[in-house]
Amino acid sequence: MTTNAQEFDRARGAMPGGVNSPVRAFGSVAETPRFFVSASGPYVTDVEGREYVDLVGSWGPAILGHAHPAVVKAVQDAAARGLGFGASTPGETELAELIAARVTRDGAHPVERVRLVSTGTEATMTAIRLARGATGRDLIVKFAGHYHGHSDGLLAEAGSGVATLAMPGSAGVPAAIAAQTLVIPYNDLEAVREVFAARGDEIAAVIVEAAPANMGIVPPAHGFNAALADIAHAHGALLILDEVLTGFRVGPAGWYGIDPVPFTPDLITFGKVVGGGLPLAAIGGPAALMELLAPLGPVYQAGTLSGNPLAVAAGRATLDHLDAAAYARIDAAAATIAEAAASALRDAGVTHVLQRSGNLFSIQFAPEAPTDYDTVKAQEAFRYPPFFRAMLAQGVSLPPSVFEAWFVSASHDDAAVARIVAALPTAARAAAEATPA
């Protein structure tokens, strides 16, 4: 039998940092990363044979639970017919139709056409190219702390892994490209108005996480997304709604379907859940805009693996089984776990707030609810590593960063939830005893 430490040593000899995505290195929590070899329902098992209750869920896609039988069978059936053809398949059309049908509210259907890609980064990159092609403008407005993938123009003041590593952006991004992105504080409509007043005729689009989940959960202020749409449209710009994390997770139509104030985005990007755990993402919007993409229009986008039949099968099976009952189970389990975490921290005397966006939630070690990236970074983040390690020692796998959401699945039954709840008091005491490095 190998150990996690041995696997990590071996991995570092083959891959930069021993990982293929930075947060997996567990650097911010000062722990040896776990190397998982199997998963089922709400549980994952590492190379040492230890089982954990999982609250990462592959960063969202495992919304039905790991290795859900219907999803596995759909992928197996698709694999038996061929791993890929480099040509169109009926399954791509069926998934695109399913996405368009689900994204609706009060009779509105903002998604008339869908383009499938392989990653969330591709989806947002394509949406921005499309916005620029549609408007003939170059500038993009984004919000500090929002993560829209790792394409060059979007890494300025990104959250998630960039925040975890305390990086302001990334080396290798040309200054001229970075200058095409205007970064402003989140939840600050006055800042939005000011940037449009100054450069509105140069701005192609505003891109925003529908309900931010890459700097911990920081919900949009009431009516914020609707106001963004109004301001952008008044200046001839587009609103790109990034639902890579929230899409089909917080409800059947994502955050678009549950935002307290209805609004009209121009383009919506999807990922995570829509691929059911395999590499797949999507861009959706009205036909007139989406058909500017090649082969009908002048905006070029292509991908050999776009709409891969295995990923399409996983996505379709996942969405087919995400019914009202599944969402009810997810919402109930998430509420129980979130409230138990807040209660344990409160009993231990730890200053904190619990932030929620639907069934997504996170703990932030601050006296008041953070509303933007600056207030998120001001929290006592040093309390999270011991909290994380104490949970891990008790067999609960949390996101290895304070800047991430916790992900609950429909498979988190009473037994799994009870194991999480039982571990929380010890973890809360560890957080209480933590001191700054």
Image (cartoon, rainbow, N blue to C red):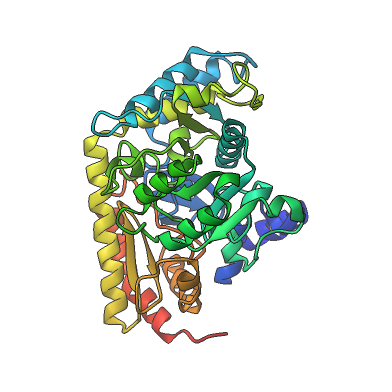
Asked if residue 237 is positioned above or below residue 282 in the image, the reply reads: below
The number of discs equals 0
Q: Nearer the viewer, residue 159 or 58?
A: 159
Looking at the image, residue 81 sits to the left or right of residue 349; the answer is right
Horizontal and vertical percent for residue 361? 35, 59
Horizontal and vertical percent for residue 244? 47, 43
Q: Residue 32: which quarter of the image? A: bottom right
Looking at the image, residue 272 sits to the left or right of residue 414; the answer is right
Asked if residue 1 is positioned above or below residue 294 in the image, the reply reads: below
- At 27% from the left and 34% from the top, the residue drawn is 105
Q: From the image, which quarter does the C terminus lie in?
A: bottom right
- At 32% from the left and 67% from the top, the residue drawn is 354
Residue 15 appears anywhere in the view: no
Q: Nearer the viewer, residue 20 or 177?
A: 177
Residue 164 appears anywhere in the view: yes
- At 31% from the left and 54% from the top, the residue drawn is 416
Horizontal and vertical percent for residue 301? 64, 27
Asked if residue 223 is positioned above or below residue 437 in the image, the reply reads: above
Horizontal and vertical percent for residue 227? 37, 50
Looking at the image, residue 197 sits to the left or right of residue 84; the answer is left
